Amino acid sequence: MRVNAEQAVFLELPPEAAFLSLAVSAAETAGKAWDLGPGRTPRLVLAVEEFFEYLRGNIPPGDTLKLSLRRRGPALRAEFRFRARSLDLRALNFAAGVAPEDGREMGLLLAARFTDRCRLERPGGDSFVLSAEVDRDYPQAEPLTQHPRLQPPYAPLDQPSGDALRHAAMLAAGRYPARLCPHGFFEPGRLLDMVAAGLYEVLVLADKAGRPAGIMLWRSPAGSLSVFFSGPYVLDEARDPAIARALTEGFLARVARTPAICAVSERPTGDLPAEFFEPLGSVGCTQGGERVEQQAFYRSLREDEGASVWAHPDLEPFLRREYERLAFVREILPVEADGGQPHSLLATDLDLRRGMAVLRPLLDGRDLAANLARHVEALGREGAPDIFLHLDLGQAWQAAMSPALLAAGFTPRLLLPHGATSDMVVFEHGDAAH
Amino acid sequence: MATPHTDPAAWSTSRLLDRIPAYVRAFECYVPSRPDPVLMRQYGLSHLYRLNNNENALGPPPLAREALAALESGRTAQYPSGDSYNLRQALAARFGKSPEQFLVGNGSTEIIAAVIKSFCGPGDALVTADQTFAVYEWVGRFSGLETRLVPLRNHALDPGALLEAVNERTKIVFLCNPNNPTGSWWNRDTLEAFLESLPADVVVVLDEAYREFTEDSRFPDGMEVMERHPNVLVFRTFSKMYGLAGLRVGYLCGGQELVDVVRRCHIVYSVNVAGQMAAEAALADDAGHIAATRAMVAGARDFLRDAFDSLGLEHVGGIGNFIMVRTAIPDTLLYRQLMRQGVMVRTMTAFRFPNWIRISLAQDEAMEAFVRAFRAVLDQG
Ligand SMILES: Cc1ncc(COP(=O)(O)O)c(C=O)c1O
């Protein structure tokens, strides 16, 4: 693993207006020190300013705000940690870019709009993390559409050079549809920075003459037990299946002795050799106005231990069918819907480029049905036709949400073993999901 | 089931975790399989055949059983011999060496860690194969050492490539002979040529955990090899042939000077009373036991080879009480499906053999149960 010496700044700030300038200047300094560039730094500064202003009035008395600024490959990340006891959590529903109907909390919305990624997380109890990332600018590279006839044997490059990586990315971008290519294939500088920072692991195969023959990428988000892979991308003119196979085996060999316990497809290409994976099913994606089914593939990397999951009786038939089909032993523990406190909280990961939003429940509440409807409506307006919700069956309070989800037009599509603290169900919104 | 932690100090915890060495952060915890009763309840089984750990299905030799049966529970109030005194005497007599040349550990895995601690410091490197027993690589990695992994060639350790991987920073080369999980092995000539070419200041760990399973005269005897090559440390265990895996006894033998170095980093008193006693008794009564075990293993191997051949499946095996087979579905899926039928095998993804499983060779009943379940799973597609 390549983890650069940590580049990070930590500040602990009293929630007082006078300290805003300190937070802001820290963001400015980080932007300058870590080459975010004069065009992009103000976006990060804006997010820090809006977050600080919102949070300082809302955290419990006596608490402080913990701000960290970190360099993460192509991005600079600002992260606030705080406790929310008396906080108006409802407002945070909009922190990831979902527009409120009534114009409140425009600051949080603005921050989300001007950054590349904005995320709200709840690591546990009443502690929250609100973060924003802004990416550096990279030049676009023209995809290469001529794929030479390559010569076996194909061997993995021990540490692919920047040029080899760049070349492989441009060849892949010229062959595979954009939805199957990570952004970095069109901006190879970004890819190189992500690999150098350990945000992506990559395997590049070369042919006998040293030309790039194939590439496969994967990432393991912090706290996740899964690795998400993209590929295999085969760069040979004749699409030699030996390349796809060597990439897949090489990928599995490299993740075999890591903390990951399963591999899940993020962008599976048509070259993926089926015998190494289990089909999980598919979800719908909108492409140029049309819906296509995107297959999902899964593979355990270890011997499954068995586990317990929570489920509302509504969801049980789906779970039993999937567990039986996938041969996972699970004890299903029943939960009842309760929705104790008044306001629910959902986090939204919005990806407008792909027209996609992923909702994650952070708090259950009595207004869940209305909140879901509000999100669906707002996301439709934003131009995200594909709306998913990830439900963690390791959390009883999340499992208890399924009746509200079904009522709000969500359908369970995929069961992802070990996708969360326990297994995860991916719900898809809309009629087309049936 | 994980419950959310409600630690208000999440911030300081996260900073604390930031300071953990990257090589520990990136390290995978080994998750051992759950106890049989737990697994049987989960999978709804009335019987479980455990074919995953290469244990000896015949158990330990009769004298060891007797010694254990006679163990007085009052004896457990006292510490064991801190350096397995009697067992080392017995080993010395068996192999014609001095007791000081032996170091007994809580399984040979414990001594692997002691060897690495003794010889390696920051910046040093280890060399081993990529598809071999995982503990060498694990201990190397969580000790923060560069661990160079050399691909096998035709499912066997590749002497030329291993030599090429050695550089001035290499302190130890780990050779698993026969290799787990492929069962491949180096003969006397291959090992001798390798040791001749290797710089004499590199320690060679020759792990012979499965050597008692062969009587082939071409198989090198580490106990003899170490006399000519003072950089060789031989590892053996009572876990496999001797059927004492549950008591955790393994040992190392080498030149006295080298063994003295390892002893400094080895934890004394780590081998318990029952283990020392049973191992000593097992050694005194092994001829019939070894013959019976070899016969069982040979029969099981033939039986499984025939079954795999008839299914047209690629299989690999050699010396040792195990065989590997490759199928056209993920090994981890196959594992779950076999478990539902009461058979536990070892998946090979973690050995970097995706879609292969390894089966321990045992008595007819278990082998037949495995083949039945295996065929049923493959038939259902
Ligand atoms: C090659 C090899 N060495 C060592 C061991 C571990 O032996 P012990 O039980 O003595 O720790 C094993 C067990 O699987 C093994 O396969």
Image (cartoon, helix red, strand yellow):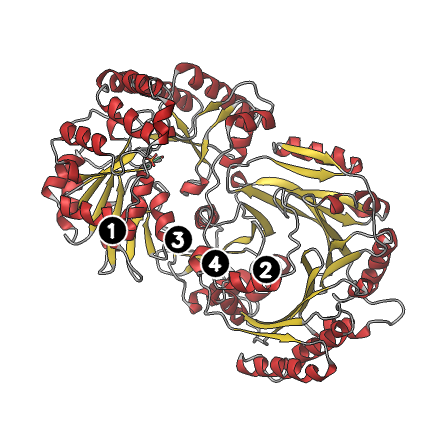
Residue nearest the observer in this picture, A108 or B242: B242
Q: CA distance from mark 1 to mark 2?
A: 42 Å
Q: For the residues carrying marks 4 and 2, which lies nearer the camera in this image?
A: 4
Q: Say if labels 2 and 3 share a chain.
A: no
Q: Residues within 10 Å of mark 2 (few under 14, many from 20)?
A: many
Would you say residue B155 is visible in this rendering? no
Q: Residues within 10 Å of mark 3 (few under 14, many from 20)?
A: some
Q: Residues within 10 Å of mark 4 (few under 14, many from 20)?
A: many
Q: Secondary structure at mark 3?
A: helix
- Look at the numbered disc 1 and say if its residue's Cβ is closer than 8 Å to ligand 1: no
Q: For the residues carrying marks 3 and 1, which lies nearer the camera in this image?
A: 3
**Position in image of residue A9 (x %, y %):** 56, 75
Residue nearest the observer in this picture, A169 or B184: B184
Q: Is A411 placed above or below A147 here? A: above
Q: Amino acid at mark 3?
A: Phe
Which label sits on residue B172? 1
